[in-house]
Amino acid sequence: MKNGLEDVIAAETQLSDVDGEAGRLIIRGVSLDHLVAGGTYEGGAALLLDGLMERSFNEAELRGWLAKARTKAFVHIEAADAALLALPPVDAMRALIARLPDGDDFDTALALLAAPAVLLPAVLRLQCDQKPIAPDAALSQAADILRMLTGKLPSKEQVAALDTYLVTISDHGLNASTFASRVIASTQAGLTSSVLAALSALKGPLHGGAPGPVLDMLDAVGTAENAGRWLGGALDRGERLMGFGHRIYRVRDPRADALKGALKPLITSGQVDSARSALAQAVEAAALAILKARKPDRPLDVNVEFYTALLLEALGFPREAFTGVFAIGRTVGWLAHAREQALDGRLIRPRSVYVGPLPAAA
Ligand code: CMC
């Protein structure tokens, strides 16, 4: 048995491949750097779902259907009462998604792709006593998310940055949430159940819950000069540095550079303050040096969450919403894996080794 199922192969997939030694991510035969070069959320989603649903479609068709599905999803915000709005945004969003009917068909998948994109901005606005903004079917999913969040039409650099983020994190091998999605799909419970299980796995700080704490870390470090001292203190206290280390990658996570690249046009066009990114780069350099010195036997490098934090902050998302934005992008991966598993048809049911006491002899 391998603790944490490390290196255990638990599925065959045509969806994505993570090469942790080479630092390479392939999604359906396309490398990440190609996918993010001008790629849109809808293009990435069409690629992932191609051939897995009962009908085939292209990027433009998906964009139109998604726009309609967002309008339909908006009605569910009416169920957001005071108790629901007192929850963290990702939990409030999960409770609202749980209202969607279960099913295995394309309409269920569309509803699940649209719902997080509409419900997260609406929840965030209600939590600040602002009126939720209805979707605009003329916009792309990325542009509409930003408009529903801020009430303003986003710039083309902002839309491109969010598209890059959503494509970059759309799928990533058999991570914990994707595995959860496949386990549920194997029982034939339905796509809504798969997505809810995956979302529950995602929110932990060892998976998709790290980018908020990355910003907390940057705030606590404060200045580039303080980085080494602060990070050393955190390691002395036995803490992990958020945004560093990965179960699979032994080199730099390629998604980190895709997101760093997406941030650049926002900085050069003066839409975000370059001081934050300068601090982040100083913290990154100090963290890599100190991790190398303290953990010489374990290569620990920057992971996707470090630059996720900077990018989502630059786009105006509050840090408590970062895991929810991750879910907006990853839902298509969860759905594709759930469909792939359902088409395989085999129930996932591993065994455990019993190490407890035996009954007393009679
Ligand atoms: N800071 C300090 N030490 C670390 C870190 C870190 N971020 N990550 C791993 N280590 C150390 C760990 O303490 C252990 O040392 P030792 O052997 O002396 O006890 C060694 O490295 C191996 O750690 P591990 O727990 O066996 O590694 P893992 O493969 O189970 O952990 C991880 C992967 C992502 C949970 C971990 O690196 C971590 O906790 N990182 C911080 C949280 C974070 O950034 N999470 C986002 C992950 S990326 C999103 C995704 O793809 O899901």
Image: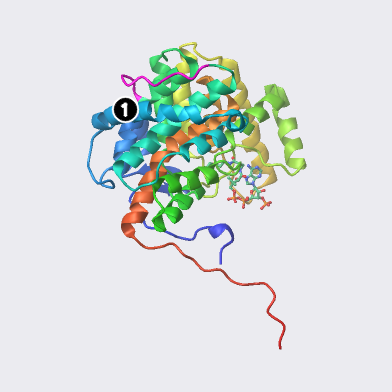
Q: Position of residue 358 (x, y in %)?
A: 68, 79
Relative to the observer, which residue lies in front, 50 or 17?
50
| Vertical arrangement, residue 150 with respect to residue 57, above or below | above
Q: Residue at x 55, y 34 (%)?
A: 92
Taking the image as shown, residue 50 lies to the left or right of residue 253, namely left
Relative to the observer, which residue lies in front, 44 or 289?
44
Q: Position of residue 333 (x, y in %)?
A: 40, 43
Taking the image as shown, residue 101 lies to the left or right of residue 65, namely right
Relative to the observer, which residue lies in front, 35 or 183?
183
Whether residue 256 is visible here, answered yes or no, is no
Circle 1 residues within 10 Å: few <14, some 14–19, many ≥20 = some
Q: Residue at x 56, y 14 (%)?
A: 273
Q: How many marks?
A: 1
Q: Quadrant of the N terminus?
A: bottom right
| Vertical arrangement, residue 47 with respect to residue 194, above or below | above
Give the main secondary structure of the magenta stretch: loop
Q: Quadrant of residue 310?
A: top right
User: Which residue is the site of mark 1?
Assistant: 68
Task: Answer yes or no: disc 1 within 8 Å of ligand 1.
Answer: no
Report the magenta residues as a range.
131-140
Q: Is residue 285 magenta?
A: no
Q: Residue at x 73, y 37 (%)?
A: 234
Q: Position of residue 226 (x, y in %)?
A: 73, 25
Taking the image as shown, residue 9 lies to the left or right of residue 291, namely left
Q: Residue at x 53, y 29 (%)?
A: 80
Circle 1 SS class: helix
Looking at the rendered structure, the kind of residue marked 1 is Lys
| Vertical arrangement, residue 194 with respect to residue 317, above or below | below
Q: Quadrant of the C terminus?
A: bottom right
Q: Position of residue 217 (x, y in %)?
A: 67, 30
